[in-house]
Amino acid sequence: MRWLIVIFLFVSVASLKAQVNLVPNGDFETNSSCPNNEAQLYLATPWISTSDNDINLSSTPDYFNQCATSAFCDVPLNLHSFQLAHSGDGYSGIVLFDVHATTREYIEVPLTSTLLANTSYYFEMYVNLSNLSSYTTDAIGVYFSDTVVTGITGNNPLPFIPQLNNAIGNFIDTLSWILISGNYTATGGENVLIIGNFNNDINTTIIEEPSGQYGASYCFIDDVSVIALQTPLCIDTNYIPTILTSENLVLCGVDTVWMIAENGYDQYLWSNGETTRNLEATSAGDYFVDALIDTCWFRSDTIHVDAATPVADFTVTFDDFVATFTNLSTDAVTWLWNFGDPNETIADSSTQENPVWTYTMVADVPVTACLFAYYDLYCYDIYCEEIISGSISANSLSLLNIYPNPATTSITIEFPASSTFKNAELSILTITGQVVNQTSIQNLQTTIDVAGYSKGLYLFNVQTGDEVVVKKVIVK
């Protein structure tokens, strides 16, 4: 049975790849002449820019090829990066985001044939972030148009809603080419493909790249293809495939979401290009599957997958026995507090974001208060802290502040200005318990460099004397 499965998958993928690519020169290998400067996408015929290509007035996509006569546009070393092509010798490049001013660049190409109504098409391209980019982003999409868009002046986002978008959280990488793919069911008449960031700046998610040298996100693009599936989608509710999913459709921390298409179909093609019956979703977004019976494809309903990493955290201050809790949790939408009041005859809990609680206990008796921070029922985090009512010492670690959280390059550990502590010991651990850093803290404010840390959740363990506090920090 194992050999049969392997052969079946090979044939499925091979049959998909063997079909005709409707994107001419999708690998950017053909050119009317070799590039010798920036803003020469038009040399990779028939690719063009949606703008008037005036470098002083509008966006100017670039063309890179190994045959270039200038170092500005050579491959692999050019003005923006050292990057080999995904295949062959050439690729294109566009600006997705600029921190200094709203800037978008788009590449455009006429398809070799007009798309047919109710026909499903598979799209894919490979993208890579230039080494000099100060930011990466997941904001890049594809718009299928029924007319050529040219002569646009200025650098603002085009006023179109792309039919296909990169998955949320699939940030473009400087090290490797990232696949962006999906299925599109045509309305009919589309004959032009436009690629770029159609979001405004507010809706463009960015992450800082510490090694970047200019304040933009510049993206290379290669191997663009649009392939028609064997037949149009068929409309028959009796054959629509169902999808069995994990009970929780949220990527919580490092979890994955499994989806299993209904059995009994000849072939499967997921919206992200996978051709197996089972799909392991590792990024947020919308997923569906096309399933083949004989010569007819049927499409499932869409399954939406979210991503979240809730981190519970709080501080507390006292006025005699009245405790004011300040919620510092991130990526959570609901909360559940347990104040640890020793009086068992009262319900010592709350769902408020920043509750106030009056304790019914003797002063200076420690209790443990806990906060549950929920993104949803299955995705949550817990933080507990031992506190003492009546008064709170200026040296208490409950007043410790660690920020920013999430962080990208550095994290600041700050004690209150009134603190008189001598020193503290800091241990930083991964969520699996591996120690990545140990150091002494001797100042009220200390900055820790985390630029070289892998992305994920870390535990910051701070100890002064007999008091210990553990803070959870996300590094992006």
Image (cartoon, grey):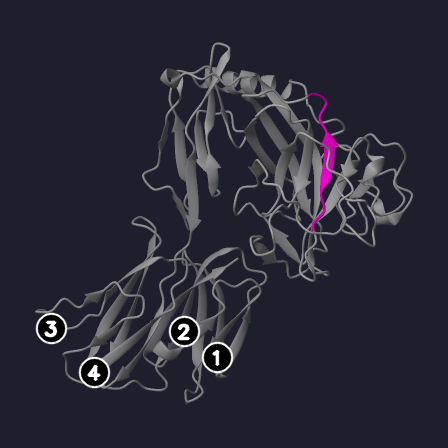
**Amino acid at the residue labelled 4:** Phe
Seen at 63% across and 48% down, the residue is: 173
Identify the mark nearer the N-term, 1 or 2.
1
Front disc: 3 or 1: 3
Q: Is residue 392 magenta?
A: no
Query: Which class describes the residues within 10 Å of circle 4: few (<14), some (14-19), or many (20+)?
Result: some
Secondary structure under tag 2 reads strand
**Amino acid at the residue labelled 3:** Asn
Query: Which class describes the residues within 10 Å of circle 3: few (<14), some (14-19), or many (20+)?
Result: few
**Mark 3 to mark 1 CA distance (whole Å):** 38 Å
Seen at 36% across and 16% down, the residue is: 238
* Camera-nearest residue between 282 and 454: 282
* Disc ID at residue 321: 4
Give, as a single range, the part of the protein colored magenta. 104-113
Q: Quadrant of residue 189?
A: top right
Asked if labels 2 and 1 touch by Cβ distance under 8 angstroms, the answer is yes
Q: Which residue is mark 3?
A: 343
Tell whether 426 sits left or right of 327: right
Q: Measured from the top left, where is residue 186 in percent x and y? A: 57, 25
Q: Quadrant of residue 309?
A: bottom left
Tell whether 31 sits left or right of 96: right
